[in-house]
């Protein structure tokens, strides 16, 4: 396969294939920007990909997104990502140890943590083998939730001129750690909440924990007549089909790569929907692990999390002034930052 022909390829700095026959490890690391003067950051995903092409395209797309996230968060580090092909792996711990050993060959140019398919226990396994892991002291999920809430407050104030959440309604897609964390914050404020997930166990758990919540099917979440759609599941939640069904005023959530393509930002703008670019909204997790890497100072962490709201407001203001979609504005700013960085 010719990686350069993939649409996700963006003059990446380097792409690495890591394999270990004895454990069945097959993994890819993509460094989009950075990695020379400062390491590149991005979590490691453990996922059942159909084939290597799917895994490579995913790691290219995700690593590029990390550069946008880092740039807009005001961080000096480049973006990267890693994916491990779960496939027919029989011993996950053995695969993770082999993966961590292979990362040592990158001599600190890539620093990583845990993403979809990984747990804190998995992180401990890998961190015993390599120093290139972060997230043991930080709480990236909590920081992500805090950042999303900062963005939500700004967006709601911009659209409704009122930050009283008890007057607002939300549809939350995805009940992972961040989705549940956001629901908890909204629930405490008396907001009306609709929620969904493809995992029935998570649905049962959320119903027990938050009895006033409204559960709906994964398909019907798009047509809910609510104020805010909060995507917290996997990529491309906003696509050519789902966009036609949206009846909301705001989209702001923790999922990565929410738009199937950049042009959907134009359609959202035409529909009168304020879109908060995902990589700005969900930057709290990255901010927290980099804070751990640098100093582990709580004050610095809180300041950078609050700055997420400041960044969103700037993007909205510029979008209105230039009459261009928010994702267009944010993308051009981020690209100018990371393409001109050393």
Image (cartoon, grey):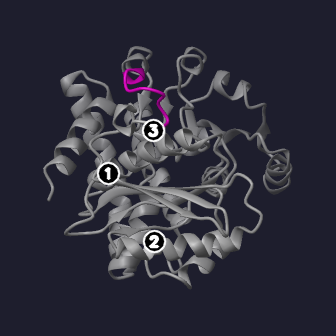
Residue in the image at 39% along x and 14% along y: 270
- Residue 246 on the magenta span: no
The label on residue 156 is 3
Residue in the image at 42% along x and 26% along y: 261
Name the residue that disc number 2 marks: 103
222 relative position to 196: left or right:
left
**Which residues lie in the magenta part?**
257-265
User: On screen, 37 above or below 53?
Assistant: below
Q: In the rendered view of the protein, which quadrant contains the N terminus?
A: top left
Residue 198 visible in this rendered orientation of the protein: yes
What predominant SS class does the magenta segment belong to? loop
The label on residue 32 is 1
Q: Are marks 3 and 1 in contact (CB under 8 Å)?
A: no
User: On screen, 315 above or below 130?
Assistant: above
Badge 3 crowding class, 10 Å Cα cut-off, few under 14, some 14 to 19, many 20 or more, is many
Give the SS element for disc 1.
loop
| 2 or 1: tag closer to the N-terminus | 1
Q: CA distance from mark 3 to mark 2?
A: 43 Å
Residue in the image at 39% along x and 24% along y: 265
């Amino acid at each position: 396969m010719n990686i350069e022909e993939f649409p996700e390829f963006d003059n990446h700095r380097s792409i690495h294939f890591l394999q270990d026959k004895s454990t069945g490890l097959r993994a890819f690391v993509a460094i989009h920007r950075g990695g020379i003067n400062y390491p590149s950051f991005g979590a490691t995903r453990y996922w059942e990909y159909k084939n290597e092409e799917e895994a490579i395209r995913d790691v290219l797309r995700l690593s590029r997104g990390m550069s946008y996230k880092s740039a807009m968060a005001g961080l000096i580090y480049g973006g990267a990502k890693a994916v491990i092909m779960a496939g027919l792996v029989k011993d996950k711990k053995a695969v993770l140890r082999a993966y961590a050993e292979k990362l040592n060959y990158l001599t600190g140019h890539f620093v990583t943590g845990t993403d979809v398919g990984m747990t804190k226990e998995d992180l401990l396994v890998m961190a015993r083998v390599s120093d290139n892991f972060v997230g043991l002291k930080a709480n990236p999920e909590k920081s992500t939730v805090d950042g999303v809430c900062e963005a939500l407050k700004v967006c709601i104030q911009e659209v409704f001129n009122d930050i009283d959440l008890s007057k607002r309604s939300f549809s939350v897609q995805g009940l992972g750690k961040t989705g549940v964390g956001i629901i908890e914050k909204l629930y405490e404020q008396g907001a009306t909440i609709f929620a969904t997930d493809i995992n029935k166990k998570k649905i049962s758990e959320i119903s027990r924990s938050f009895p006033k919540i409204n559960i709906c099917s994964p398909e019907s979440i798009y047509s809910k007549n609510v104020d805010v759609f909060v995507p917290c599941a996997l990529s491309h939640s906003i696509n050519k089909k789902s966009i036609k069904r949206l009846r909301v005023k705001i989209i702001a959530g923790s999922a990565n790569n929410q738009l199937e393509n950049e042009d959907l930002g134009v359609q959202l703008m035409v529909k009168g929907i304020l879109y908060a670019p995902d990589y700005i909204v969900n930057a709290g997790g990255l901010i927290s692990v980099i804070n751990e890497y640098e100093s582990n100072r709580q004050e610095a962490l809180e300041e950078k999390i609050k700055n997420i709201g400041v960044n969103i407001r700037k993007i909205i203001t510029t979008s209105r002034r230039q009459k261009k979609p928010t994702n267009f504005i944010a993308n051009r700013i981020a690209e100018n930052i990371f393409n001109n960085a050393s």
